[in-house]
Image (cartoon, rainbow, N blue to C red):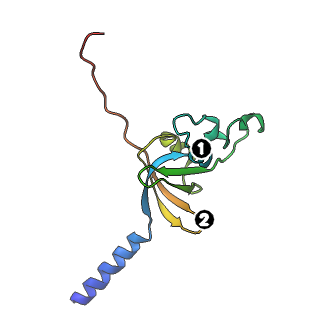
C-alpha cells in the first residue's frame, strides 16, 4: 500500500512539473532589452515592435509584437511566446518589474511558451504628512 501511495504521489508531482516554471522579471520587447532602454522604451515598441515602426504600418492595423522578459538578477533575456495568452491582459505588466510568466522554456531558442501571466501588485497607497 505504501508503494502505491508513493507511485501516485510521483505521478501528481510529475503532472505539476510539466505545467511550467515561473520566470520573474521586467516585461518588455527584445529590442528594448537589447538596448537596455527599460524606462525610456517608446510605447510604439509595445504596439508594433520597434522605434518609429508606426511610420511603416497602416493606421489601425493590428500587429503582434514580440515580447521578452528581462531578469535583473541574472541579466538574461528570454523571448515570450504569448500565443496562448490574451494580449489585453498583458498590458497590465508592460514595462513593469515583478511580472511573472509561467511556462515551459525551450532552451534551444531561449523562448518561454507562456501559459499564464501574473501582473505585479499595484503600488501601495501612501500619505504624505508634512509641509510643502
Q: Which mark is residue 35?
A: 1
Q: Residues within 10 Å of mark 2 (few under 14, many from 20)?
A: few
Residue 38 drawn above or below residue 112: above
* Nearest the eye: 120 or 62: 120
Position of residue 46 measured from the top left corner of the image (x, y, whole percent): 61, 40
Task: Give left or right: position of 9 versus 16.
Answer: left
Which of discs 2 and 1 lies nearer the camera? The answer is: 1
Position of residue 45 measured from the top left corner of the image (x, y, whole percent): 63, 40
For residue 60, say whether it is visible. no
Which residue of the protein is positioned furthest toward the left in this rendering? 2
Task: Give left or right: position of 30 versus 73.
Answer: right
Residue 130 drawn above or below residue 80: above
Q: Secondary structure at mark 1?
A: helix
Q: Secondary structure at mark 2?
A: loop
Q: At 38% from the left edge and 69% from the top edge, which residue is drawn?
A: 16
The residue where tag 2 is placed is 109
Q: At 47% from the left edge and 55% from the top edge, which residue is drawn?
A: 116
Q: Marks 2 and 1: CB-CB under 8 Å?
A: no
N-term mark: 2 or 1? 1
For residue 33, say whether it is visible. yes
**Which quadrant, please, contains the N terminus?**
bottom left
Res 9 → quadrant = bottom left
Q: Which mark is residue 10?
A: none
Q: Residues within 10 Å of mark 1 (few under 14, many from 20)?
A: few
Amino acid at each position: 500500500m505504501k508503494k502505491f501511495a508513493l507511485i501516485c504521489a510521483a505521478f501528481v508531482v510529475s503532472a505539476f512539473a510539466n505545467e511550467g516554471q515561473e520566470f520573474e522579471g521586467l516585461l518588455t520587447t527584445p529590442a528594448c532589452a537589447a538596448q537596455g532602454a527599460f524606462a525610456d522604451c517608446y510605447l510604439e515598441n509595445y504596439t508594433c515592435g520597434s522605434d518609429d515602426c508606426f511610420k511603416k504600418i497602416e493606421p489601425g492595423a493590428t500587429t503582434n509584437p514580440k515580447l521578452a522578459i528581462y531578469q535583473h538578477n541574472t541579466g538574461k533575456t528570454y523571448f515570450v511566446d504569448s500565443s496562448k495568452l490574451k494580449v489585453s491582459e498583458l498590458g497590465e505588466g508592460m514595462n513593469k518589474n515583478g511580472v511573472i510568466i509561467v511556462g515551459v522554456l525551450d532552451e534551444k531558442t531561449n523562448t518561454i511558451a507562456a501559459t499564464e501571466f501574473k501582473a505585479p501588485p499595484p503600488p501601495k497607497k501612501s500619505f504624505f504628512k508634512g509641509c510643502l
